[in-house]
Amino acid sequence: TSVTNTIVAMMQAGDRNEFRRAFAGATVHDFFNWLSVLILLPLEAATGVLYKLTLLLIESFNIQTGENAPDLL
C-alpha cells in the first residue's frame, strides 16, 4: 500500500499544487503504516494481545461448527 499511494500522488504531477497535496497525503499515509508496524508488531510479539482480542471477538459471534453450522458465504 505504500507504493500505491505514491503512484497515485505521481499521477497528480500535472498540477503543481495538487501534486504537493497528494504527495503530502501519501507521506502521511506511509508514516501511519510505519508507526502501526513499529507499535503493534512488538506489542503482539511480547504479549499476544491482538490474538487474544481477536479470539474474544470471534467467540462472541457464537459460530457453530459441524453439520448444523449455518452457511456463512
Image (tube, rainbow, N blue to C red):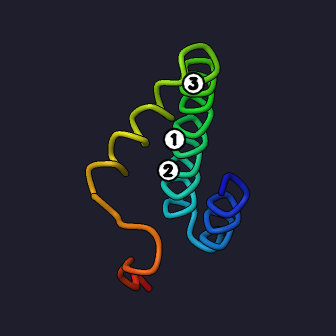
Three-letter code for the amino acid on which mark 3 is drawn: Glu
Q: How far apart are the alpha carbons under marks 2 and 1? A: 5 Å
Using residue 4 as the reference point, say whether residue 59 is left or right of it: left
User: Can you tell which mark lies on residue 53?
Assistant: none
Which one is closest to the eye, mark 3 or mark 2? 3
Determine the residue positioned at 54% across, 32% down. 36
Which one is earlier in the sequence, the residue at label 3 or at label 2? 2
Contact check, label 2 and label 1, Cβ < 8 Å: yes
Three-letter code for the amino acid on which mark 1 is drawn: Val
Three-letter code for the amino acid on which mark 2 is drawn: Gly
Q: How far apart are the alpha carbons under marks 1 and 3? A: 24 Å
Which one is closest to the eye, mark 1 or mark 3? 3
Q: Where does residue 44 sit, x and y in percent of width and height?
A: 57, 24
* Disc 2 element: helix
Q: Where does residue 52 sit, x and y in percent of width and height?
A: 44, 31
Determine the residue positioned at 62% across, 27% down. 41
Determine the residue positioned at 34% across, 48% down. 59
In front here: 35 or 66?
66
Contact check, label 3 and label 2, Cβ < 8 Å: no
* Disc 3 element: helix
* The furthest residue to the front: 67
Determine the residue positioned at 57% across, 51% down. 26
Q: Is residue 70 above or below residue 21?
A: below
Residue position marked by numbered label 2 in the rendering: 25
In front here: 22 or 38?
38
Q: Where does residue 58 sit, x and y in percent of width and height?
A: 37, 51
Residue position marked by numbered label 1 in the rendering: 28
